[in-house]
Image (tube, helix red, strand yellow):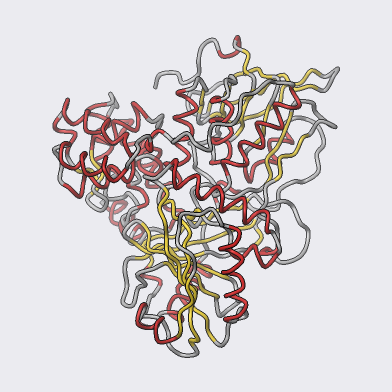
Amino acid sequence: MTSRIPQDLSERRFDLIVIGAGVNGAGIARDASLRGLKVLVLEQDDLCSGTSSWNSRLIHGGLRYLEHAELGLVRESLRDREILLRTAPHLVRPLPLLIPIYNTNKRGPLLVRLGMIAYDFLSYDKTLPRHRMFKRDKVLAEEPGLNPEGLRGAAMYYDAQVTFPERLVLENLLSARENGAELITYARAGRILLDEASSTVQGVEFEDRLGGGSHQAYAGAVINVAGPWVDQVLTASGRRFDQRIGGTKGTHIVVSAFPGAPTRALYAEAAADARPYFTLPWNGLYLIGTTDTRYEGDPGRVEPTEEEIEYLVAETNRMIPTAQLTRASVLYAYAGVRPLPHVGKGSTGAITRRHLVVSHGSEVNGLWSVIGGKLTTYRHLSEEAVELIGKAKNWKLPRCPTKTQALPGGTTEDLAQFRDSFERTCGLKAATARRLVEVYGVRAQGVVDLIRAEPELGKVVSPATGALAAEIVFAFREEMAQTLTDALMRRTMAGIGPGAGLDAVEAAAAVGQNYLGWTAERARSEIATYRDYITRFHPQGAEARQTREAAG
């Protein structure tokens, strides 16, 4: 594998080093680079390989935050939702949600109606429709699969869904790179380099987890956006810091369409603990979650438990009796750790989802950390962080451009028009063309160009999702993939299809051999690594498949 580390890295001087390439780190890198700063991003794994992937995949205002009087957070979220609908139209789309109201619910019709009115008021500049209240008969006519027992009515409102947050993170980094930023994945940040006399940041030492060896990069400002690993990064500075992160775990399950499945997303109250949870039409499947429990284990190996899976299965069957889901219905499940502020006691649901950009100037000059935050508000967080750092460093920065500047895949005046034209001219089946636009936006043309140069790349490598061989090549040549797992999980999105990418792994590795110069040994290693990686999601049938392979 060729070196990913620039040979002159230690001789260069960056303005800002960003540790972490989740959505917040990617957003900060984009914002800073668009304003002319020299930026280096270090990520210990692949981009978006942590918290930013394992959420409910919603761009939402945070309706339930109204209960905790976080009006500012709701308003900020609703404003950024509108921005993303404009700047990433291929990835972020309107989503109608229904809140069924039952006799047993903690939140009755009046409270829900008041919440809806407040939500509409706080999103006064939105382009999405206002809420509507439905009576019982109307609810059952609209969603006949809902349990009719004790049903009083429902509220319908709109938020937005990002089917592939992985792609949202990637496109922020592609934009940052286009504007001069440097990104190094599989680079684990270690010691924060300091001028000991002044306790001032000089840079970061990091480990190359693919090529081996230790490297140093230099900058006068470092922002720690490592999510659940924020405290570990701070510890590596050699100075003493208070605990900042109090992670909570959220688990989701993914199932195929089932009897009585809703046509809209459901936002319901769980019978077991009154916690709100979602049943979301997503990626041709249904995404159900989430849980919310304290977590103190390794964030890099967080897995759903059988108890959590059964909880979500049971709540779905209670809400939709005809579903009759069982453990065997679960195609796969995933869990992530929310990097929330450390709070010693109390309900996890009451912990603020508001982000904090913390200056460590009293201990280390030039070091900041990001605590918490939401997928929806990453853009605003990024703007705030760059402004704070710029003020502290006396940088004369131009105004933030991310409110209006589209992400690379969304650079079109009319996405629907582009989609129609692309379907007519790309030479692929209509369903394949639509899928490419959903994943890549206007950058889908780059995939088609590869196929025109090498027609064999038009073959499907993932029957479950329709992903093409060309997408594997595109992932490595144009989208910074370093491993097969990167390509399947966070570029082509085949890894989150119904087969969890296991239908694609061998064909994708063959593409690596035929077009990317992989040896047979590397192809076998990439296949084995992917299969090991995907076990944490408990994919349907994986145990039986592994047993057969081990036997022969």
Residue drawn at (14%, 33%), measured in percent from left and top?
456
Residue drawn at (45%, 58%), measured in percent from left and top?
128
Q: Is residue 132 left or right of residue 192?
A: left
Q: In this view, does 130 lie above or below 395?
A: below
Q: Which residue lies furthest to the bottom in this view?
A: 149
Q: Is residue 545 left or right of residue 401?
A: left
Q: Is residue 313 left or right of residue 440?
A: right
* The image quarter in which residue 378 lies: top right
* The image quarter in which residue 97 lies: bottom left
**Towards the viewer: 125 or 417:** 125
Residue drawn at (81%, 30%), measured in percent from left and top?
361
x and y percent of residue 28 in the render? 59, 33
**Towards the viewer: 79 or 440:** 79
Q: Is residue 405 left or right of residue 342?
A: left
x and y percent of residue 149 in the render? 46, 90
Give the number of callouts: 0
Q: Is the N terminus in the top left, top right, bottom left or bottom right quadrant?
A: top left
Q: In this view, does 72 lie above or below 35?
A: below
Q: Is residue 79 above or below residue 392?
A: below
x and y percent of residue 225 in the render? 63, 37
x and y percent of residue 31 in the render? 56, 31
**Towards the viewer: 401 or 146:** 401
Q: In this view, does 85 lie above or below 16?
A: below
